[in-house]
Image: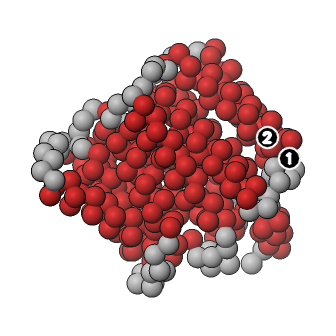
Amino acid sequence: MTKYPYLSRVSDVSLTLIVLIGMAANSLLARGALAHHLIGPTLFTLVRLASGAATLLLLSRGQSLTRPRRNALWLFLYAAAFSYTYLVLGAAMGALLLFFSVQWTMFLGAVRRGERPTPRHVVGGLLALSGLYTLVALHLHTPAPWAVIGMLIAGSAWGLYSMPGRDRGNPLAQTTSNFVYAALLALGLGAIRFLSGVAPRPIHPLGLAEAIVSGAVTSALVYLLWYALLPRLATVVAATIQLAVPVIVALGGWLFLQEALTYRFVLAASLVLGGVALTMRRSGTTEASSSAARERRRGP
């Protein structure tokens, strides 16, 4: 964080809220464009990653890219699988599969890296998952098997993309490189589909605009903040807090779309937020987070 002293002055809670709201907005933009068939999934993925790469290259001001790593592959797999599966998956089933896969991928990754989730971490994660299920249970349906596998792949890829972000480094350089190489992979996917004779879907200007905003703002900038935040959190905490994203999406529907606020939502939100709070309590932050907090107290 020494390269970004202004971020070290932002509390973990504030930065977490910004990231979660950004992730929720990104999901709404992606689902809005894809579910209404305003743009095809291949082009949406390409535009999203390319516009994100362009934004980050402008911010990096000519800094050298890091060499290609698996992080770029995970980012591409997440973005592509997310786009294709949301053509047939409902929002509720997609959210449940995605965040279930994210959480358990990161939990297993934490164990492999030597972190030992405490009973409180496990209970908090299960409590948050039960809240997510409560939130979406009424809207679940039996989806196509390939879509289930695709969304589980998307969640695992996002979890694998997130875990290396906990290693100290330059978040801007890392995120920029990830987006640039992921965009090249998306371009390759588009070329393969074109050469195979797959007819492109019609493009609506609104769908194209949503893909650009999704890439340049709610993906590139939010994922940059996510990589800046991750070293300050334990992996199991980073996994569990993302379960709050569907709750934020539902809350946004109540605030801005006049959707009903039901007792089920209140119960689900209480379970999710209670699980997140339980996971973050005391030992939820890493030594790096504690060190960052001491630096903020000392000031510049």
Q: Which residue is drawn at 33% across and 53% down?
A: 45
- Above or below, comparing residue 127 to residue 27 in the picture: above
Location of residue 294 in the rendering, given as x and y in whole percent from the top left corner = 84, 69
- Above or below, comparing residue 296 to residue 105 in the picture: below
Q: Name the residue under label 2.
A: 122
Colour scheme:
secondary structure
- Above or below, comparing residue 72 to residue 243 in the picture: below
Q: Please tell me the numbered disc located at residue 20.
A: none
Q: Residue at x 68, y 78 (%)?
A: 2
Quadrant position of residue 84: top left
Label 2, residues with CA under 10 Å away: few <14, some 14-19, many ≥20: some
Q: Which residue is drawn at 56% across and 19% down?
A: 137
Front residue (pair 149, 50): 149
Q: For the N terminus, which image quadrant?
A: bottom right
Query: Would residue 116 be seen by someone viewing this image from the given angle?
Result: yes
Q: Are discs 2 and 1 less than 8 Å apart at CB?
A: yes
In this picture, residue 153 sits left or right of residue 163: left
Mark 1 secondary-structure assignment: loop
Location of residue 89 in the rendering, given as x and y in whole percent from the top left corner = 40, 30
